[in-house]
Every structure is written in structure tokens, then in C-alpha cells.
Image: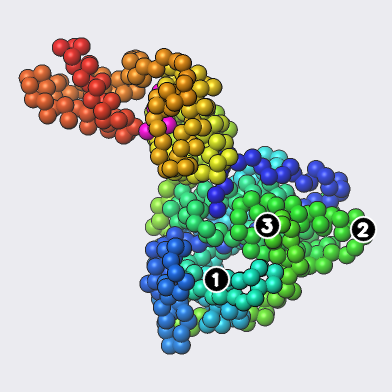
Amino acid sequence: MTDTAGAAPVTQPVTSTMAADDEVIIGLEIHCQLATRTKLFCGCSTDYRDDQPNTHVCPICLGLPGSLPRVNRKAVEFALRVGKAFNCTIAQEAEFARKNYFYPDLNKGFQITQYDKPLAVKGYLDIEGDAGEKRVRITRIHMEEDPGRLVHKGGADRPKYSLVDYNRAGIPLIEIVTEPDLRSPREARRFLNKLRATLEYLGVFDSEKEGSLRVDANISIQPKGWFEREGKGKADRGRVEVKNISSYKGVEKALTFEITRQKNLIRRGQKLESATRHFVEARGITTSSRSKEMEQDYRYFPEPDLRPLRVRDRAAEIVLPELPDARRARFMEQYGCSPNHARTLTGELRVAEFYETVAGADAMLAATWVADTLLGELNYRDMSIVRVPPDTFRELLFLLKGGNITDKSGVEILRLMLDQLKESGCCESPRECVNRLGLTVLVTTPLAATGEDPIVKAAQETLAEQPQAVADYRNGRKEAMNFLVGQVMRKTRGCAKPSDVNAVLSRLLEGEG
Ligand SMILES: [Zn+2]
């Protein structure tokens, strides 16, 4: 899935076109693959996407008789990190259970999941709702194994035959279930973006991997205030579950379609039955699907081959990294970013890291160019920010900062660079782009501008702090330069090119000598 944080919303809020006395009620169930190296109950590698079908399998994940599962400790730790980050109560003891059903992608006839003793319950995640900051409650988070994958040949509607690939079978999943607290497709999208960002900050999830996140959405339209009055009681109108939506944009599209469909039925006075529907991404519609199983159909029972997990004490030992909200606050404090820029820049881990790498050029200028220009240009090209070399982008910022090029030229240069990167994976330097585009501006080295230049500043500080190394250098011990360059690099947190640092130091040492 590639959906950039700065992407424009797919739709307008649907609520604005609804009858004033109705409201949309949405709850989500999200399956995320945990980014462990091995599967949940065996040692098979999880890195299967580019490999031949059925090459990452063993008796355990094939569910052969007599094989015994063993729990992957890393997967449990990853799931606990998520539970803590989403403010959940962690269970004293979690327990795996068998969910029995037959489907060809599940060859042992049951899925190992968690049922009445999930890992974590009663959490929340704060998002930017349609009417300001909003708390979305998390009902539960549990662990389970991914089933295999069916590949239908000859069209999804009426396949001639289906192939099964068990490489995915046994990949660790967490299922995150929300309370029905979302009120529009846009809120659902924002919730998912925040969820994805949090999982990435936790280091437990890779959103770039196809199929790493799948969503089921429950949706109904009820008379306004019904939910607050009746809670989870019997709804006035049926609730539809849209299954297996596998892209971020797909969630918003599926919900928008489903709301329109339900509204039309209500307007015609037809009864809305509870049902399961399937989202057909290519056509942007939902279609009727098999009738929903009842919980008792699965005949859950505790997994006899696995002991309960004593997790609360282990969770207490986990120290969480900086999460998106904390990083947003820090960006405003440390770099002076506006609230909107800080939100955009921290909305994806890779974007936040990229920004911090280039912020040394000029924090405010970098915020504007990353949040307002770069992300939009990347989204337009369906490119990830990881493909942009920070050094090259920083050089562009220096040219802009030094007044060597105009903003308009800056955009032209950036576009040329991104087109080159998309095509060949590498690009010319901004200065080479200036020549290629025939931009008639004076280009001097950014290092000519002294004073506020962060490299010059760091170099001046270093020289003041290291009189011995300076004396050594002047006494002909040229290796002292390597030491000084290292000190400046540390001060600029690796944001400067060694050759630039060397040039600046040489000039300062010569000037003062
Ligand atoms: Zn295996």
C-alpha cells in the first residue's frame, strides 16, 4: 500500500448530504501483519513476497498431523508494544484458542487465534475528528495466525480454478477492534493513518509490504443520538460488515459507497438487513457475499498445544519509543514548525525521519518544502519518500536559502529530480538540474554564505573547543583535520557532506592563520 500522508482526501464528508436526523456509525477491525523475521508458531521466514508459492512452509505452518506450534516471543513482544501504545489494559494471562472452520487457505481446519482471553483490552487512540480532537476507543487487540492465500485464475467473479499458496500461512497478525466511534469515512481514514503511523513508530509493522494491513468495516446509519442512547443494543436498522478491504484509500471508498447504498434503501422505505458484503476495489462498489457466520458456528475452544501467555509483567518492562503525538509536539518546540506542518511531517515515520535529516539546512524552510511541496509531488508520482536522497534535497534547500534560485525554479528542479529518480533510481544534483533546465540564475556554493550556515557555525564552535587539534594542524600534523571534520559531522548530526566540512574548516583555519 502506498498512500502518502499528505494525500488529498478522496471524498467530502458524506454526513453533510444525509438527512439531518440520521448519523453514520462506523467501527473497524484491522488485521496487521507484525514485521517479525519468522512466523508465529514456526521458524519459517516471513520474507515470502518475491518467492515462489509454497517455499516458506514446514509441517507446523502446513498444519500437518503431529506437528506442535511454538510461540514466537518477538511476535508477542511486538503485540504488547501495540497494546501499550494504544493505552490498553494488558491481560494478566492471554490464551490462544482454536477457531474452527473449513476453507482451502486454512488446511488444518482451524485458525489459532485468541477468543475470550485476548492480549489487550479497553484502549484508545486520539485522532483529528470531523469536529476537532477525538478519542476512538479500542475494544481489544488479539494475536492470531494469517491463513494462506488463494489465487483465483480466470477472473475473480467466476474463476476457472484456484491455486493455494501457504507462504502466508502462520504469519503473525494482530487484530485491532474499535468501538463504533467513527462518524464518517474521513474519520475512518484519519484513524487508519494514525494507526499505521503508530505501528511504524513502534517498529512492528511495514506498511510498504503488500497486504500487510487489511480492514473489515462495520457500518450502519441510525437515527441521530441512537448510539449514545442505546449503545450496542439492538439497532433500529441493520448493520453491514464490509470485508477484507486491502488499501487505505479503499476503506474510504468502500464506506462512502456503502453509505450511499444504505441511504438510498432508507429513502425508498426498504428494510436494511444485517449482512456481510465484499468490496470490489477495481469498481469501487460493495457486493453481497456469503451470509455471516454466528460466533457459535466457530466452536472456539482453548488451544491445547499452547500454554497461556503470562504477559502483564512482560509488558511492564517494555519501554516505548517516541510516538507520533510526542514527535509532533517536539517538532513544534525544537524546529518551530506550525501545528499543521508538524502534523503532516510526523504522520509517517519515514517522512519524519527524512525531515529531521534535512532540517539542518533551515528548519522552517525545510518544513515548508517537505510538507507543502515534496509530499504532494511524491503523491502525484506514487513514489515513497525513501527514494529521495536527503543530501540532494538538502542541497536544493541551500540553493533556495542562499537566494541562488527562486521558489518557482526550486519546484521545477524538484520535479526534474523526482522524474529522474522514478525512472532510473538516481538523479542529477540540483546544480546540474539548473544547467539542464537552462535557469539563468547565479549559482554559487551555499558555503559562500557564512554566519547562519549551520556547517560554518558548527566549524567555528569546533575550532574554539579544540585548540589542541588546531595547534596540531598548524604545526603540520594534517591528520588533525580528520579529527576536526569528525567533530563537526557530529555537531551537524551527519547532515553535512565531509567534503563541504573539509572545505569550510580549511578556509577558517587559513583565514585565522
Ligand atoms: Zn513453517
Q: Are marks 1 and 2 in contact (CB under 8 Å)?
A: no
Please name the residue that numbered disc 2 is placed on: 268
Nearest the camera: 372 or 69? 372
Nearest the camera: 376 or 138? 376
Q: Is residue 73 above or below residue 388?
A: below
Please name the residue that numbered disc 3 is placed on: 282
**Is 153 left, or right, of 94 in this rendering?**
right
Q: Is residue 60 visible?
A: yes
Magenta residues, as a range? Answer: 391-398
Q: Position of residue 236 (x, y in %)?
A: 84, 62
Q: Does residue 396 belong to the magenta stretch?
A: yes
Amino acid type assigned to the residue bearing label 2 in the image: Arg
Q: CA distance from mark 1 to mark 2?
A: 40 Å
Magenta-colored segment: predominant secondary structure: helix
**Is 109 left, or right, of 155 in this rendering?**
left
Q: Residues within 10 Å of mark 1 (few under 14, many from 20)?
A: some
Q: Secondary structure at mark 1?
A: strand
The nearer-to-camera label among 2 and 3 is 3
Amino acid type assigned to the residue bearing label 3 in the image: Ala
Q: Residue at x 57, y 72 (%)?
A: 150
Amino acid type assigned to the residue bearing label 1 in the image: Arg
The nearer-to-camera label among 1 and 3 is 3
Q: Earlier in the sequence, mark 2 or mark 3?
A: 2
Q: Position of residue 165 (x, y in %)?
A: 51, 73
Q: CA distance from mark 1 to mark 3?
A: 19 Å
Q: Residue at x 11, y 25 (%)?
A: 478
Q: Which mark is residue 149?
A: 1
Q: Residue at x 81, y 64 (%)?
A: 238
